[in-house]
Amino acid sequence: MPFSKKRWIGMPVLILIFLVITWWVIGKIQYRLNVMDVEEYEPISTLKVPQHPLTHAKFPFIDVHNHQWIMPVQNLGKLIVEMDSLNMAVMVNLSGFRGKILEWSLDNVHKNYPNRFIVFMNINFEELDDKGWPEKTLAMMDNAVKAGANGLKVYKGLGLTDKDNEGKRIAVDDPRLDPIWNKCGELGIPVLIHSGEPNSFWNPKDKHNERWLELRQEPDRYRDPAKVPSFEQIMGEQHHVFKKHSNTKFIDAHLGWFGNDLERLGKLFDEMPNVHTELGAVLAELGRQPKAARNFMIKYQDRIMFGKDTYKKEEYYTYFRMLETGDEYFDYYRKRHAHWKMYGLELPDSVLKKVYYKNALKVIPRIDSRLFP
């Protein structure tokens, strides 16, 4: 059958459309092949500014937020060498646990480096409905302090995942826990408490969430609002404990998760003189707002302590550089916490000394003050 004029015209059009679509598809494939993932993107800055990297703190410091999980059997001598290289005078191990593990940790410290390590005890709050609560726990706390424990560390499970015998979430301000907070005040030991998470962990995991990368790499950190209490609820419970137990000293971990809202953290300090904080794992929040952060650190210089959280020697360098220098536009040590750059606060020596050691000496008992100038 002979082709009609229309079919002769239509065939080239179809071929042209096919070629355009093919070209578009190939282009998309090539683009995808050439596009790197955000986790791979590590640009080297071309900015030329003065650089003052530091590997040693200007003054001896106390790290009030550290975790040494195997302290009962740990070679502390090796750790001491690294601490000395950083100018870390005292490390506070918040993971002392309880019972025999706590006893073995304290024995290792006392036999080897009794003035270089402080050990905090831990409590199993899920026992609060068991027979003998709270008397057994209070007796354990008495014995732990007599043996050398210097504080109580409360993990984020309280308020988030810890449950009572009926399977109900244990709120941070559950009245069944009041004897614990009172006992800490009676014993003169601080409570370093981690409640909640960064508020971004409750937000949708989309392009607007600045902690998207962390939630991608650590998906279990996402807090589904349909399954867990809100950020504000947990913060409210924690602050209720602070107010209710004004005779007990609290160290609100990680800047109380208000490093991105320093005005709110300042109001917390103004209302509650028994509350202090530390810098563990949230230094990046201050590094992106150097003017506001510097003013805040100076204003509340008596309430802030040095803390690091997970231990890796090289990561301390960023802390020293940000606290001590006025350097601009340098990297944080963990991309998923901060894809932005850091700016130094260049704190006065008088403030540095308080953050590095003086504030901790006032709050944590039995630290050897002879280690400091």
Image (spheres, helix red, strand yellow):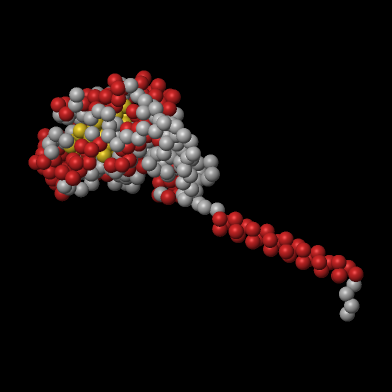
List x then y, in percent, for residue 36. 52, 52
Q: Residue furthest bottom?
A: 1
List x then y, in percent, for residue 311. 28, 42
Q: Place residue 318 in its image quadrant.
A: top left
Residue shown at 16% from the left, 35% from the top: 116
In the displayed structure, 150 sits above or below 268; it is below
The answer to whether residue 107 shows anywhere in this view is yes
List x then y, in percent, for residue 332. 40, 39
The answer to whether residue 275 shows anywhere in this view is no
Quarter of the figure with the N terminus: bottom right
User: How many numbered badges does the structure rendering display?
Assistant: 0
Viewer-side residue, 241 vs 151:
151
**Residue 152 horizontal side relative to residue 314, left or right:** left
Quarter of the figure with the C terminus: top left
List x then y, in percent, for residue 220. 40, 49
**Residue 110 horizontal side relative to residue 301, left or right:** left
In the displayed structure, 373 sits above or below 172; it is above
**Residue 42 horizontal side relative to residue 25, left or right:** left
Viewer-side residue, 81 vs 361:
81
Residue shown at 13% from the left, 38% from the top: 113
Residue shown at 14% from the left, 34% from the top: 115
Q: Residue furthest left?
A: 111
Residue shown at 49% from the left, 39% from the top: 46
